[in-house]
Amino acid sequence: MLRKPVTKHALKAEMNVVPYIDVMLVLLVIFMVTAPLLVQGVKLELPKVAAKALPTDSQKTILSLSVVADGSYYWNVGSEVDIKSRSDQAVTLDEMVMKIDQIRLQHPDLLFFIRGDKATDYASVVKAIAALQQVGIEDVGLITESPDD
């Protein structure tokens, strides 16, 4: 007579999903690591549009700061935005911040505008804005030119 083999564990007819979960977690980690590396930047060609001038308070003094392509700065202080004339200039960022902070103490109602030359790199303009923020100037406008010029 034939006897059945004695087994301690009964056979299971269920599917073991643990290996599939492990594979899914490994794939998830791989995609999470590689996804940020794939996007380096998006090349854009910005449209040239004419923007309307912002209304300014004629009672306030205006400081228009220009960032030149060589990394130097010049500015004009007056009752209107003037980018052609220069009331003072600075070669370094620290010198510019020191002089503008002195002007700000003399004119507490000063409005700030920054203009970057076409050949100026973006980092120079951002450094100027960050340096102005460090001395307490938080409201800064950007000057642009119309595309017809």
Image (spheres, rainbow, N blue to C red):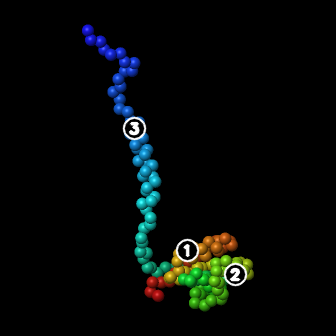
Q: Residue at x 58, y 90 (%)?
A: 84
How many neighbours does mark 3 have within 10 angstroms: few (below 14), some (14-19), or many (20 or more)?
few
Q: Residue at x 59, y 85 (%)?
A: 81
Q: Residue at x 41, y 74 (%)?
A: 45
Rendered location of residue 16, percent (x, y): 38, 33
* Vertical side of 125 occupied by 32: above or below: above
Locate residue 79 relative to residue 49 in the image: left or right.
Answer: right
> Which element type, helix, strand or loop, lies under badge 1?
helix
What's the residue type where badge 1 is placed?
Ala
Kindly identify which residue carries mark 1: 123
Quadrant of the rendered image containing residue 125: bottom right
Whichever of callouts 2 and 1 sits on the residue coming sooner in the sequence is 2
* Vertical side of 107 occupied by 31: above or below: above
Rendered location of residue 23, percent (x, y): 40, 43
Q: Nearer the viewer, mark 2 or mark 1?
A: 1
**Label ID, residue 19:** 3
Quadrant of the rendered image containing residue 63: bottom right
How many neighbours does mark 2 have within 10 angstroms: few (below 14), some (14-19), or many (20 or more)?
few
Whichever of callouts 1 and 3 sits on the residue coming sooner in the sequence is 3
> Which element type, helix, strand or loop, lies under badge 2?
helix
Kindly identify which residue carries mark 2: 99
Mark 2 → mark 1, Cα distance in angstroms: 21 Å
The answer to whether residue 17 shows anywhere in this view is yes
